[in-house]
Amino acid sequence: MPNNYEIVWRSLGAMAMLFLMTRILGKKQISQLTFFEYVLGIILGELAGFISTDVEANFLHGTIAMLVWFTVPFVFELLTLHSKGLRRLFEGKGRVVIKDGKIMEDNLKKERLTADEMLEQLRTKSVFNVADVEFAVMETNGELSVLLKKDKQPVTANQLGLRTVNEVEPQTVIMDGKIQDEPLATLQLSREWLMTELEKIGVTLDNVFLGQVDAYQQLYVDLYDDKIRVPAPQGKALLLSTLKKVQADLELFASATRDPAAKTMYGQNAKALAGVIENVKPMLQS
């Protein structure tokens, strides 16, 4: 029984040290780890498991070993921040495997990458034809970076001359049928507003799995009952149509009045509102 308690406190101590070391060394996804960081993670995990369960071993010795395996890579990481040569030594460098639609077989061999593995990585980038690739680079973390040829790249709004606007992150205001007050407060909205919006689309709160509100105060909901069809938000369309109607009314007033000053005022306001509509149209039509 004493050994059981010792294993518990050893495990908790090793877990705390491993968590602290991982936080200090930084957080990366597995696919982003270099070979050195991958090996480091394995060794630290092995050491943590060893000092947790081997009650006959000296806990302090295991702790010192973990500190050594933590300190050395941490120091090297600080050094590589200021030295490109050290970065290449410890992390390697990217290698071109496709250039102008041609596969660089020698570089594939150096990366120990088979044709099947390369094609698989291309497919994850939605590229199915090697001839469409301007060049592809195998990065140090094992990811394939791909640049398509100019005529194969997706058309952008900039190329079409379309105006775009920055989107604002929507706030999740309902989750699992429960109202989230903090996101509502971020949008400066109330529970009463939310319940009114739910009534407009004819759904009850307890049937809402997820509800989000965008920057235009449009409510999107996903229901538990997928058979129920929820009408799409019309806030943007209604606002745009209202602005156009007001502009049309101003132009009508300008043509109908006989007062020169009023005619000028209505005309100027109609022209100004037309400019506003042109500016907000990309937002309200997206």
Image (tube, helix red, strand yellow):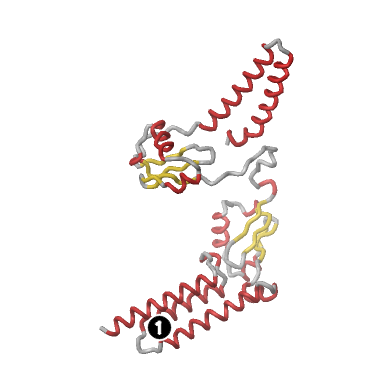
The amino acid marked with disc number 1 is: Ile
Q: Position of residue 231 (x, y in %)?
A: 44, 32
Quadrant hosting residue 17: bottom left
Q: Position of residue 133 (x, y in %)?
A: 65, 54
Question: Helix, strand, or loop for circle 1?
Answer: helix
Q: Is residue 277 left or right of residue 185?
A: right
Q: Is residue 187 above or below residue 113?
A: above
Q: Residue at x 42, y 75 (%)?
A: 15
Query: Seen from this angle, which residue lies furthest left?
Result: 1
Q: Nearer the viewer, residue 179 or 167?
A: 179
Q: Residue at x 61, y 44 (%)?
A: 166
Q: Nearer the viewer, residue 138 or 91?
A: 91
Q: Residue at x 69, y 27 (%)?
A: 272
Q: Is residue 34 above or below residue 3?
A: above
Quadrant hosting residue 160: top right
What residue would you read off at disc 1? 51
